[in-house]
Amino acid sequence: MARATLFIHDLESAVSPGGHGPLRGRDLAELRVHSPASVAISGDRVLAVGPPGEVLREHPPGPDCVTLDGRGKVALPGLVDCHAHPAFLGDRAAEFELRSGGESYEEIQASGGGILSTVDATRRGSEEELASAVGRHLGWMLEHGTLTAEAKSGYGLDRETEMKSLQAIVGATEKSPLDISPTFLGAHTVGPEFNSAAEYVEFVVREVLPEAATLARQADVFLERGSFEVPEARRYLRACRERGLGLRLHADQFSERGAIPLAIELGARSVDHLENTGEEGVRLLAGSNVAAVLLPACGLFLDLPLPPARLLVDGGAIVALATDFNPGSSFTESLPLAMNLACTRLGLSPAETLNACTANAAHVLDLPDVGRLQPGYRADVLLLDAPDWRHLAYHLGGDRFTAIIKGGKLV
Ligand code: NIG
Ligand code: FE
């Protein structure tokens, strides 16, 4: 009989995605709910979740066990943000003001602002400044219940700053309680020193990727007019795959231009955004193993069309939800906000949104033992100060946690 090292007793309820692996179709709406419940943890793993008497009998607290009173609270798995850009310096408040006056994101980008203005600020900062910015951004995420996050590079677009970004991300893993999955977004947009996307991609593949691949787990490309088209994206992603990186694509954000067929051809892990995906794209994704990552906060921030969320879920695609935290198109670190928007604007149910930013987001990051409050999974647990887990999506911007447990330890 394994003894608990952390024990949460008499919760109002404990809630988790069911099953294992990614959830599709009707399974996305199913949750495993125990009410009332206790949770026993040993080391960094969940031992048991279930009726209080049963959990106490089978896994009594050990001598140095930390005990938490769960009365009036709900336990949930830590949230997983599978699409985030926390490695940047500076801000885009001035552009935000321009956009409030009617200028579009693409117009600002075409006139040299947008991503390139953040590239400029990030290149000018020191390694220490960038590392401290990454740490600060991860701290914001943690406050909103994110216990595992992706962190993309992509605001360097030169060898030195891309590596500085990935090093800051990997370095933050040692200092932050979050688990971080580093992604090489070497193809975010064309570096300002280059005349064409093809020329820039050759540079990235030859000069940056070999070293970047030693730090990153996944690679990403922005396939969009003004950044990269299918041929350059294919060249970049194939080279990244050869280096062992999982593949991600920023796809169909402003226009549909072949990202989904390319993702399927290359066996990518996900396509993210999809605000302009049409019927054929939905059909292709539903029949594939490429996950669809929806970013409703970005849609709100830029006033984009809504992605076909309901059609994707009902068609059987693997759907995940993320913040897209970045300074230009989605300046929010809150997954509960994304959950609320997915319910109010995309027509997903609260259960679908919770599964989408826990189990399915962990699948997108290829982290099979994360995202569930079930025996054997990593003990990443949120204690929500509410009588019903749905408050996480329902209370707009009001997520209240009384305790956060990461890898079995109180944060
Ligand atoms: O996911 N679209 C490309 N990349 C980011 C935005 C980056 C930025 O504007 O700084 C996105 O929306
Ligand atoms: Fe993004």
Image (spheres, rainbow, N blue to C red):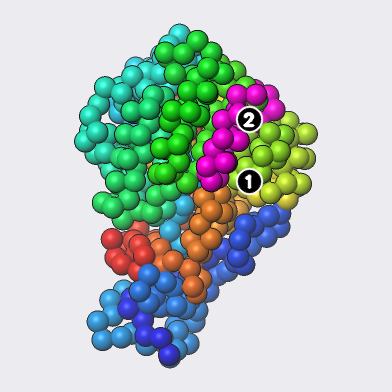
Total labels drawn: 2
Tell me: residue 73, above or below residue 204: below
* Region of the chain picked out in magenta, as a range: 231-260
At 53% from the left and 74% from the top, the residue drawn is 34
Q: What label sits on residue 142 in the rendered view?
A: none
Q: Nearer the viewer, residue 294 or 193?
A: 193
Tell me: residue 389, above or below residue 235: below
Q: Nearer the viewer, residue 305 or 356?
A: 356
Residue 359: name its quadrant.
bottom right
Look at the numbered disc 1 and give the secondary structure of its residue: strand
Q: Quadrant of the N terminus?
A: bottom left
Marks 1 and 2 sit apart, C-alpha to C-alpha, by 18 Å
Q: Is residue 161 left or right of residue 29?
A: left
At 51% from the left and 57% from the top, the residue drawn is 367
Task: Kindly identify which residue carries mark 1.
Answer: 291
Q: Is residue 159 left or right of residue 130?
A: right
**Kind of residue at badge 2:** Arg
Would you say residue 325 sits in the magenta stretch?
A: no
Would you say residue 234 sits in the magenta stretch?
A: yes
The earlier-in-sequence mark between 1 and 2 is 2
Using the rendered image of the protein, determine whether residue 210 is visible from the camera's viewpoint.
yes
Using the rendered image of the protein, determine whether residue 104 is visible from the camera's viewpoint.
no
Q: What label sits on residue 234 in the rendered view?
A: 2
